[in-house]
Image (cartoon, rainbow, N blue to C red):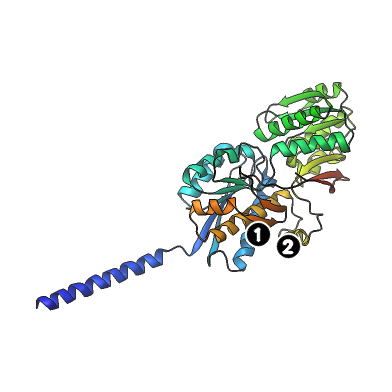
Amino acid sequence: MKTRRILTIVLLVGVLVSMTLSGCAKKQPVTIKIGGVGPVTGEAATYGKSTQNGFEMLVAEVNAKGGVLGKQIETTFGDDKGDPTEAANVYQKLISQDKVVAIVGTVMSKCTLAGAPICQSSGIPMISPTSTNEKVTAVGDYIFRACFIDPFQGTVGANFAYNNLNARKAGVLFDNGNDYNKGLAEYFQKQFLALGGTITAFEAHPTGIIDFTPQLTKILAGKPDVIYCSDYYNDDGLMAKQARGLGFTGPFVGGDGWDSPDLFAIGGDAVNNSYFTNHFSKDDQRPEVQAFVKNYTAKYGEAPDALAALAYDATGVLLQAIQNAGSTDGAKIRDAMKNIEYQGVSGIIKFDANRNPIKSAVLIKIENGKQVYAATVNP
């Protein structure tokens, strides 16, 4: 009798264990969740839409080939609206509620700097496609980027203005409330002066204004050969129109913030004879670039810009790191990213000790309302 009771208990325990293990097996995730962040609405909406397109396109391609670690990639994309407070909320939600294992984002440096500390403290790897301010990766060792940084970009702009455009006097106009704009302006000024050039005026403007006449008047009083505008496309277009209205006929030079299909719509003919540093050119004849341009255009009805290309590459880097790590553990993904060498459409991406990529820049000219490849500058 006692033996029978013991056997019954053993059988019951076995059934319970089996049920428990079965329940645990069912709860195992069948997808790998990653997040994306960008300004889909707000002052830089075209950037966010391009970023989301590149992010989702790469994931779709990877899923079509079987996914990563035998699992499909599940995505959630959050709109930070170009606002740091919104960005912090989006990052927090992706990590706390959506339970993502890593994040691609965001676009604007001021927003990335709001989200990066949240990822760092949570042990969630993140890679910004386009935030160029050098402070971004200084937040911590879980923070990466797919783009070159402002010191390189501002320096390249100054070298191009001095050596290629033969400019000896330059005016500088920038948004003082944006780390990206201010950083580019400062690095341009530093290098242009080091080359022997003169800065006719170094003018800051408050965020949100649409009349730049006071600042431009001061700049033009010194008769500059070139004006460096480090803002985003919406301000740059207005600056160009107003500067032309005041009689300026020389070239403008700027950063990758000029890269938007809306630039010409805002600035019209005034933005012709402008140059800007960028991460990618759709005219690059490498096979992988032309395949990307063809597929992106077929999918979205327009050619990709640098924002789309960098988001595509950043997502590729992240998913390759998960595959290399053989795990969705944050620390293992981070370590795999540090050692990666990824062939992207924006070039080969491998990271230095500060998790910044070592890569080339291209110079794009605005000519007859279109972007035309001008030059490539190596690091």
Q: Which residue occupies 40% across, 67% down? A: 26
Question: Does dot 2 land on a helix, a strand or a loop?
Answer: helix
The residue indicated by pointer 1 is 57
Q: Disc 2 marks which amino acid?
A: Asn
Extreme-left residue of the structure: 1
Q: Quadrant of residue 41?
A: top right
State if disc 2 and disc 1 touch (CB < 8 Å). yes
Question: Does dot 1 land on a helix, a strand or a loop?
Answer: helix
Is 288 situated left or right of 225 in this image?
Answer: left
Q: Disc 1 marks which amino acid?
A: Met
Is 286 situated left or right of 329 in this image?
Answer: right
Instruction: Please rate how many residues cluster around mark 1, counting C-alpha atoms within 10 Å: few if below 14, some from 14 to 19, many from 20.
Output: many
Q: Which mark is residue 295?
A: 2
Q: Is residue 96 above or below residue 252?
A: below
Q: Quadrant of residue 73?
A: bottom right
Between 111 and 284, the residue placed more toward the observer is: 284
Q: Which mark is residue 113?
A: none
Q: Earlier in the sequence, mark 1 or mark 2?
A: 1
Q: Quadrant of the C terminus?
A: top right
Q: Quadrant of residue 5?
A: bottom left
Is 105 situated left or right of 119 in this image?
Answer: right
Between 325 and 313, the residue placed more toward the observer is: 325
Measure the alpha-carbon separation of dots 1 and 2. 9 Å
Residue 293 in the image, given as x and y percentages of width and height: 76, 59
Instruction: Please rate how many residues cluster around mark 2, counting C-alpha atoms within 10 Å: few if below 14, some from 14 to 19, many from 20.
Output: some
Can residue 343 be seen from the camera position used here? yes
Q: Quadrant of the N terminus?
A: bottom left
